[in-house]
Image: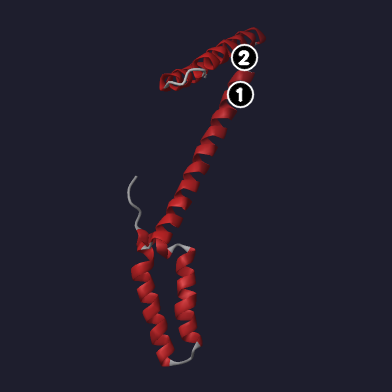
Amino acid sequence: MTEPNYRREFARSPHHIWLAILTLGLGLLSVEFLGLILGVTGYTLGWIYLPDMPFFKKWLRRRSEGAERKKALEEMVSFVRRRDAQLGRLSPVRRERYDDLVTVCRDIERATTDGTDGAGETRARKLEELMW
């Protein structure tokens, strides 16, 4: 995964909005030239330092992980719909044979997951792929 452009992401974040309100907004509200200079200075310093701060990077990482989880969930739902549609088109005889195969695969899964080695997980995953 490539490193995101933190400055570009900062420009789109709520942190940027709050920085602008707290610095430029308060500088303008002070109605004094010194207040405006301090506001612009604070805004500039915020642009320099805030995108590189750990709390912003952590917030950005959590947001991207949430988007990835949402995409994976959507893919899973799409797969389940396609699978259910194909299972619905099976004739009763083939559906019964499929259900028997699923039962056998579940028994094998149960038998392989009783062990504690990592090979059991690989076998179970391959078995799951075989079922679909």
Q: How is the image coloured?
A: secondary structure
In the rendered image, the vertical position of residue 8 relative to residue 29, given as above or below: above
- Tell me which corner region of the image, top left, top right, bottom left or bottom right, holds residue 88: top right
Q: Is residue 28 left or right of residue 51?
A: right
Is residue 34 placed above or below 110 in the rendered structure? below
x and y percentages locating residue 84 in the rendered image: 61, 24
Residue 85's disc is 1
Q: Secondary structure at mark 2?
A: loop
Q: Nearer the viewer, residue 71 or 43?
A: 43
Q: Is 124 placed left or right of 101 in the picture?
A: left
41 shown above or below 84: below
Q: Residue at x 49, y 89 (%)?
A: 30
Residue at the spot of label 2:
90
Residue lying at the far front in this picture: please name it: 116
Quick one: which residue is furthest to the bottom in this view? 32
Residue 109 place in picture, x, y as percent:
53, 16
Distance CA(mark 2)–CA(mark 1): 9 Å
Q: Quadrant of the N terminus?
A: top left
Quarter location, residue 120: top left
Q: Amino acid at mark 1?
A: Ala
Residue 113 in percent (x, y) is at 51, 19
Pick whichever, 29 or 81, lies toward us: 29
Which residue is found at the position 47% from the left and 52% from the top?
63
Q: Residues within 10 Å of mark 1 (few under 14, many from 20)?
A: few
Q: Tag 1's secondary structure?
A: helix
Amino acid carrying label 2: it is Leu
Other residues around mark 2 within 10 Å, as few (<14) / some (14–19) / many (≥20): few
Using the image, determine if residue 15 lies above or below residue 111: below
Of callouts 2 and 1, which one flags the residue occurring earlier in the amino acid sequence? 1
